[in-house]
Amino acid sequence: MTADPLFYEIFKELPELFFELIGLHGKEPSIYKFSAPDFKQKGFRLDGLLLTKEGYNYKEIYFLEAQSYKDKHFYDKFFGKIILYLTQYHPPNKDWYAVVIYDKHSNEGKFPPYLNLLLPTLRCFYLDELAKAPNPSLPVGIMRLVVEKKKQDKTTELARQLINQASQELTDATLKEKVLEFIKTVVIDKFANLSREELEVMLNLESLKKSKVYQEGKEEGREEGALETKLQMVPKLIKLGLSIEQVAESLELDMETIKKVANQ
């Protein structure tokens, strides 16, 4: 699954799901940014890299590869790309991990003994095995949807289950909307002949959108977004010479909030 755009998109937009998948539930996703760097003159490209933002160099970084077919030279190439990245870009982070997401365990090849020195950095996850757990997590389900074969009935059933699961489990309104949108994107990618209206009927999204919980969630998300925009304006307005009182009045926020943001 070389540089699969769906995997790229999910970890770029929803890094929370990556950390849920690898079992780091308390990890703070906002300190990471996702990319798929190329290498000079080598023609190599990483499927994904979760690199820390400025100020978080003491945290580990994650090299990511998604694999859906057997390749006996996979680990040579994967670790080769990692070493190339480290020698070309010289990230300041001390620790790093190599994460491989296999669609099924049988697609994993043998690990070459001459790379045993790097084995402690490797973390492998097998979607076929994770999906058999009594209550598979939402990230595992979404990954399964990405690699699911193009069988409309089976895909529709899985997508509906994931939509219900996301609606029940996710409390953050913005994250919930992103997840639902991504699920729709995956299904659209699989069945390009369907219109968006047909897709929403197929996934029963219309009834979800009309529900009180969804409407309240969207409203909450809009309010949070508006507040975030206002807070981002505080330093700019103060830099322009406005007083704390003027900024508070202009943005319709209380002075304590303005002072707190100004002192950060």
Image (cartoon, grey):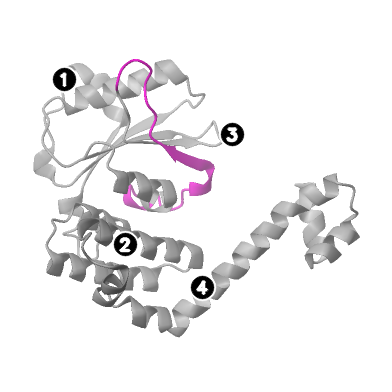
Q: Residue 202 placed where, x, y %? A: 24, 75
**Where in the figure is residue 216, as x and y percent of width and height?**
52, 79
- Say which residue appears at 71% left-offset and 59% top-offset: 230
Identity of the residue drawn at 41% across and 15% down: 87
Query: Seen in the image, is 63 located left or right of residue 70?
Result: right
Which numbered mark, 3 or 1, is in the foreground of this view? 3
Residue 218 numbered tag: 4
Q: Which residue is mark 2?
A: 183
**Dot 3 corresponds to which residue?**
54
Q: How many marks?
A: 4
Position of the N terminus, as image quadrant, is: top left
Where is residue 84? Give x, y as percent. 35, 18
Q: Earlier in the sequence, mark 2 or mark 1?
A: 1
In the rendered view, tell whether residue 213 sits above or below residue 91.
below
Q: Amino acid at mark 1?
A: Pro
Which labelled disc corresponds to residue 113? Answer: 1
Give yes or no for residue 108 being in the magenta stretch. no
Marks 3 and 1, Cα distance to the nearest angstrom? 36 Å
Left or right, residue 116 beside residue 25: left
**N-term mark: 3 or 1:** 3
The CA distance from mark 4 to mark 1 is: 52 Å
